[in-house]
Amino acid sequence: MYKILTKSPLFKGLNEIEIEKVLNSVKFKIKSYEQYESINFRGDRYEELYIIISGSVIGEMLNHSGKVMIVENITAPFPIAPAFLFGNNNNLPINIVANEKLKLLVIPKSSILKMANLNEIFLRNYLNIVCNKASFLAKQLWNNTMNSSLKGKLADYLLTVSKNRAEFELPISLTKLSDFFGVPRPSLSRVFSSLVKDEIIEKIDRKKIKILDREKLLEI
């Protein structure tokens, strides 16, 4: 467990021995879930931090008509919703479901506070994660309000996940990406085809993308 945690952004800069020392000074537990098993529901109080040791989860929203929108796909060894652990209103805004067989490290809020007091690196990492998430959500809000076209939203998404690389892999499938944008899969496929036809991107395979013209993506 400690080896996989060295790759978690929460423990960045700490080795296995240092992580073991910090965790052994507080209370924690390990929980296992089967594929598609619900972990938390929208509105639940979030009093313990979940860190994925193996497997992945999906954060989803369900509207009144029953349509499911995938908000996020979180894989090991990332934490789940660290920004919602603290604050006056720490109710989860989404459902959390196991995407596959799953193992979680579960740490109570009081233990997280103790770990932050014991280790400055852990505290700094936690604050960085929360701040980066706030920045990402602000960008998503701008994208959804200022970017009315699906093509513009997709261009912004590709620029974000590429991280200035020419070639990269989409972190989620086209089906889940269409759920993320709240559009039918064929509509998203048509926009992808349009970008390929205009020689702005190249689809190497199902998930691997090559950006041919970053300037045009920025214009879109």
Image (tube, rainbow, N blue to C red):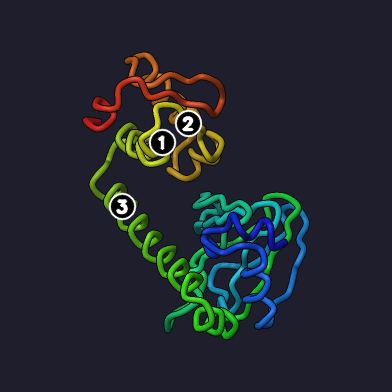
- Depth check: give the residue in front, 202 or 63: 202
Query: Any mark on residue 162, and which?
Result: 1
Q: CA distance from mark 1 to mark 2?
A: 6 Å
Q: Earlier in the sequence, mark 1 or mark 3?
A: 3
Disc nearest the viewer among 2 and 3:
2
Q: Which residue is mark 3?
A: 139
Query: What is the crowding at mark 2: few (fewer than 14 residues within 10 Å), some, or many (at least 20)?
Result: some
Residue named by callout 2: 168
**Amino acid type of disc 3?**
Lys
Q: Quadrant of residue 5?
A: bottom right
Q: Quadrant of the N terminus?
A: bottom right
Of residues 4 and 78, the one nearer the viewer is 4
Q: Secondary structure at mark 3?
A: helix
For the residues bearing labels 1 and 2, Cβ distance under 8 angstroms: yes
Residue lying at 33% horizontally and 38% vertically, measured from the top left: 156
What crowding class fits label 1: few (fewer than 14 Cα within 10 Å), some (14-19), or many (20 or more)? Answer: some
Q: Is residue 53 above or below residue 174?
A: below
Look at label 1 and name its amino acid: Ser
Please name whichever residue, 16 or 188, is drawn nearer the observer in this view of the structure.
16
Cα–Cα span, label 2 and label 3: 21 Å
Compared to residue 69, the image places residue 150 above or below, namely above
Q: Is residue 40 left or right of residue 159?
A: right
Residue 84 position within the rendered picture, expressed as x and y whole percent measured from the top left: 48, 72
**Label 1 – label 3 distance at C-alpha:** 16 Å
Q: Residue at x 40, y 64 (%)?
A: 128
* Mark in the foreground, 1 or 3: 1
The secondary element bearing badge 1 is classed as: helix
Closer to the chain start, of discs 1 and 2, is 1
